[in-house]
Every structure is written in structure tokens, then in C-alpha cells.
Amino acid sequence: MSKTLESKVAVVTGGSNGIGRAVVQKLSKLGASVVYNYHSDREGGLALAEEIAGAGGSATAVEADISQKSDVVALFDRAMADYGRLDIVVNNAGIAIYKTIEEFSEEEIDRIFAVNIKGVFYCCQQAARHMADNGSIINIGSTVTRVMLPRYSAYAASKAAVEQVSRVLAKELGGRGIRVNTLSPGPVDTDLFREGKSEEQVDDLAATAALGRIGTVDDIADMVALLVGDGARWVSGQTILVNGGFAA
Ligand SMILES: NC(=O)c1ccc[n+]([C@@H]2O[C@H](COP(=O)([O-])OP(=O)(O)OC[C@H]3O[C@@H](n4cnc5c(N)ncnc54)[C@H](OP(=O)(O)O)[C@@H]3O)[C@@H](O)[C@H]2O)c1
């Protein structure tokens, strides 16, 4: 694989599992140095950095809760301390709570917004502070802003806010050549997606996609790689749906 991201430095949130883990692996294979956080899965988070070092790459794992501004500041400070520059930020960490509107508690509503939108906000602040000219910020949204699924109200609302922040920041940061986009996956086979779903429900969702399956984490990581690359230099302020035709 050619090292198209050699000498670039990336921060990826939620790198310990799921989509974020695949993004860390992909950016690293392309030659980027990657700083990423883990939250509850310290073992998995640290193991990934070792795996990357073993393959000749360079990665730093940092414990962080992105809903805490001080943790986010420390994550980005660590990237600057270790590598001295910042070119790519992938705001991937997120949580889902699937409940009917009557079932949601005050704490659950606060938590989903604290991680999915306040966390993205804090990360974008640090990206704006540290990022080199002509960098790229990708905020991970979701196709659920286009396909209305019962029990997804809080999650979908938080992801709609992510799209809007991206569009505004594209204008705010465009003068520095920094591109800001939302990448919105459809159903992808991770713990977050599987939680509370039967095999039958998963099969039903797969059948809804034009391509007849749910996504893999590599389907998303490959699109992240395209979007941060030079081939996407004229793409900013967009929401890119990556879902196999789930919401076609
Ligand atoms: N899977 C899908 O079908 C799908 C579809 C559309 C959009 N998305 C979005 O894609 C992103 C990744 O989802 P996923 O499916 O890969 O989820 P996942 O497998 O549950 O992984 C979530 C990642 O985020 C980290 N994380 C969770 N809470 C955090 C917090 N408060 N602070 C920092 N990191 C935290 C987790 O760390 P630990 O494991 O260490 O706790 C983990 O690395 C999310 O934004 C999600 O909304 C997913």
C-alpha cells in the first residue's frame, strides 16, 4: 500500500473499537502517525498501539472521555507533544441509546448529547487550535438523519447537530484550507449497532440496503482514507452517506 499519508499526523476519537479502530489501522497503513483515545476498553486500546508499532507504524493511545473538555485538551496536547503537528481529525467516538420518547430518562438524554455533540464540539475546538493549514476534519454522523427509525430520536438528533456543526465549521475554517465534512455510515457491524437487535432485525436492515448487506468497519475506514486524501481536496461542508444504498 503506498504511503500517501506519510508525515501526516491524525487524531481519531474512539480508536479502541469498531469503526474507529479500523480508521486508526487504515490511516496508519497509509503512513500517518495516529493519536487516538480509548474510553472503557484500556486493554483493547493499548493493544492496538502495540499492533501498529509491530507493523512498523507509529501510534499513541490515550485514555479520554470526550464529553470532558479537559480530557479532549489533553488528547490533542499529546498529539502535538508527540508529533509536533496535526493534519487529520476523525471525530468518531459516539454512543447510542435506543428508547421510545416516553422511556428516555433525563440522564440518558444528557449523556447522549454530552458524548455525541458536546464531545465533537470540544474536539473541533482543539482541531481548530492546532491544525495545520490544508488539514481535514471528518465528523462521523449517521444515516439515521435520513431514515426515520423508531427509538432513535435522541441519537438521530445528536447526529443532525453533528452535520450542522460540520457545515458551519467548513465556512469558519475554509480560509485556512481546512476541509470539514460529515461521513454518515448506514448500519455497520459493530457492538453499537448490534446492541438490542435480534439476528432477524439485523437481516431485515441488511435487506433494506441496495447492496443487500450491512456495512463492515473497513467500508467506512476506506472512505475516510479517500476523504482525507488529496483526491478529495475540493470536498468540504458535505454530508457523505456511506451506506450501500440504505437510504437510496
Ligand atoms: N455501527 C453503526 O451502525 C453506525 C452507523 C452510523 C454511525 N455510527 C457512528 O460511528 C461511530 C463509531 O461507532 P461504532 O459502531 O464503531 O461504535 P463502538 O463499536 O461502540 O465503538 C465506539 C468507540 O467510541 C469510544 N467511546 C465511547 N464513548 C466514549 C467517550 N465518552 N469518550 C471517548 N470515547 C468513547 C469507545 O471506546 P471504548 O470501547 O474504549 O469504551 C469505542 O472506541 C459513532 O459515532 C456512531 O454513532 C455507527
Image (cartoon, helix red, strand yellow):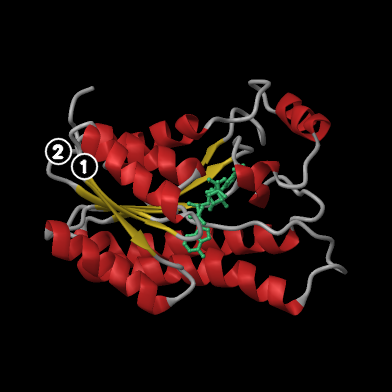
Q: Is residue 44 above or below residue 243?
A: below
Give whichever of 55, 112 is nearer the camera.
55
Q: Name the residue rendered at 30%, 45% in the picture.
A: 49
Residue 89, x across and y down, in percent: 32, 54
Vertical arrangement, residue 229 with respect to residue 166, above or below: above
Q: Is residue 188 above or below residue 36?
A: above
Position of the C terminus by quadrant: top right
Mark 1 to mark 2 CA distance (whole Å): 5 Å
Q: Which residue is mark 1?
A: 32
Q: Residue at x 69, y 72 (%)?
A: 109
Q: Position of residue 15 (x, y in %)?
A: 41, 49
> Disc 1 or 2, which lies upstream in sequence?
2
Label 1's element?
loop
Q: Residues within 10 Å of mark 2 (few under 14, many from 20)?
A: some
Q: Is any atom of residue 15 visible in this view?
A: no
Look at the numbered discs 1 and 2 and tell me whether their residues touch, using CB distance below 8 Å: yes
In the structure shown, which secondary structural element does the residue marked by tag 2 occupy? loop
Residue 76 marker: none
Badge 2 amino acid: Glu
Count of all numbered marks drawn on residues in the image: 2
Q: Residue at x 71, y 27 (%)?
A: 206
Q: Is residue 199 left or right of residue 187?
A: right
Kindly give the residue lying farthest to the right in the view shown. Answer: 102
Label 2: which residue? 6
